[in-house]
Amino acid sequence: MIRRLAWMGALFSAAVGLLLIAPLAAMAQAQSAPGLPLKAGLIALAANIGVGIAAMGCGLGQGRLVASAMESIGRNPNSAGTLFTPMIIGLAFIESLTLYALVIAFLLMGRM
């Protein structure tokens, strides 16, 4: 069991290391100005991590919202009609925050 956890930790560390190094290595070819590849790589890294965090938060929020709605419907089946519309509106609001993060990421990528 401890060996398995050690391997999982090593794989996780390697994956995080590759994630942090990949944008910097991808931008290493264009050397028009000193410091520009590093700046572009860090902007790409920030945009990708930001969208990933937003998508994770969106998934957690949507899952919690739907789980609460299903639990409420399970306790009181007659409330299904009254819970449906607010649930859909809440899901739309949660999804709009993720799309907002995607727009910000596109704006950051335009600055590279």
Image (tube, rainbow, N blue to C red):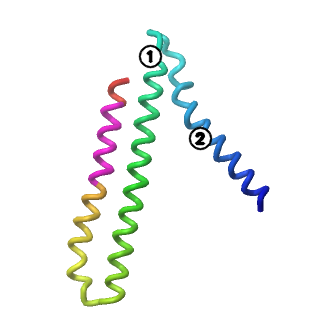
Up/down of 15 relative to 4, above or below: above
Q: Is residue 98 magenta?
A: yes
Residue drawn 77% across and 62% down? Answer: 1
The residue wearing badge 1 is 36
Q: Amino acid at mark 2?
A: Val
Asked if the residue under mark 1 is in contact with the one under mark 2, i.e. CB atoms within 8 Å, the reply is: no
Query: Dot 2: within a 10 Å radius of its alpha carbon, few (fewer than 14), some, or many (20 or more) residues?
Result: few
Badge 1 element: helix
Q: Which residues are magenta?
A: 96-108
The residue wearing badge 2 is 16
Q: Indicate the position of residue 51 as horizontal and vertical percent values.
A: 40, 44
Give the quarter of the image for residue 81: bottom left
**78 relative position to 17: left or right:** left
Q: Indicate the position of residue 14 as horizontal and vertical percent values.
A: 66, 40
Residue drawn 79% across and 56% down? Answer: 3
Up/down of 106 relative to 40, above or below: below
Query: Dot 1: within a 10 Å radius of its alpha carbon, few (fewer than 14), some, or many (20 or more) residues?
Result: some
